Amino acid sequence: MKKNGLVGAVVTAIIIFGALFCLIGCIEKVPVGYEAVVYNMNGGVSGETLTQGWHIVAPTKKVKEFTVSNEQLILSKDSREGSEGDDSFKVSTSDDAMLSISFQMSYRYRPETLVETYKKFKGMDGEAIIESRVKTVLKSKVSEVTTDYSMMDIYSGNRSEINNKLTAYLDDAFSTAYGINVLDASIIDVHPDKKLKASIDNRVTALQQKQQAEVEQETARVQAETALIRAKNEAEIRITEAEAEAKANRLKASSITPELIQMKEAEARLTHGWVTVQGTGTAVVGTGK
């Protein structure tokens, strides 16, 4: 009896440990910022997704993870996070130049379409889709936007406009094709070769000279207009002064009357003797009384 009891205890322990082992094997952890698609071992998809945290999944099922938080794809000339060595690439411009650029893209998978994305790409996870699918078409998609801009626009122009168009264009394309939302796409640097750099420098110099000439022309125009306004003002002042003087003379002339002259003669004779008055303020003194 004791032997049978011992065997029973051992069997029970084995069953318990086996159950615990199976249970541990069924536990799946979905990392922070990810969601997972649940699929059957035979390839079927259950249609459910798991959010971040610990989950118990049947032994006949597995999960594929997709990032639903913001991730960055960096393709740069120098080594940066997500970029190994020189990952820069060339894009086309409206003036038929090929310009090497460094590029970055912030993205995340759309949670509401994860199951469809999983089915479409036959069981690939999110990272595999980026590496094997998105990267292969990204360069041509960026060129489809940059062909609307000249080499100078991309090198030294208003790059924020280009980046806004890149973001909108890639978000529209990748949302449909890969179930990805593009949050930001931008050209972060430009790397022209020596020949192209010399051409760009010449254009920059010519543009600066043109802008300087335009500034000088504008300055000369403003100075000429200022001189013209000053001369006009001075002429108007002189005309106003002349008109005022003429008006004063007319008033002065109109104020001389025979009576005023006679009065002035009388005043002068009292003072000087015999005088002849020629105006209101002028007396000609005679030689005798």
Image (cartoon, rainbow, N blue to C red):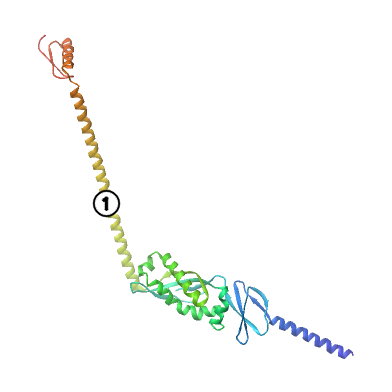
Write the residue at 51% across / 79% down. Answer: 131
In the image, 174: left or right of 282? Answer: right
* Residue 17 seen in the figure: yes
Write the residue at 29% across / 61% down. Answer: 210
| Residue beneath disc 1 | 221
Residue lying furthest left: 287
* Residue 191 seen in the figure: no
Q: Position of residue 74 (x, y in %)?
A: 49, 73
Q: Quadrant of residue 204?
A: bottom left
In the image, 183: left or right of 154? Answer: right
Q: Position of residue 63 (x, y in %)?
A: 62, 80
Q: Identify the amino acid type marked 1.
A: Arg
Q: Which of 146 and 201 is in front in this view?
A: 146
In the image, 54: left or right of 287? Answer: right
Q: In which quadrant is the N terminus drawn?
A: bottom right
Write the residue at 85% across / 88% down. Answer: 6
* Image: 280 above or below 40: above
In the image, 104: left or right of 10? Answer: left
* Image: 19 above or below 210: below
Q: Is mark 1 on a helix, strand or loop?
A: helix
Residue lying furthest right: 1
Q: Position of residue 92 (x, y in %)?
A: 37, 74
Q: Position of residue 197 (x, y in %)?
A: 35, 70
* Image: 131 above or below 260: below
Q: Residues within 10 Å of mark 1 (few under 14, many from 20)?
A: few
Write the residue at 38% across / 65% down. Answer: 156
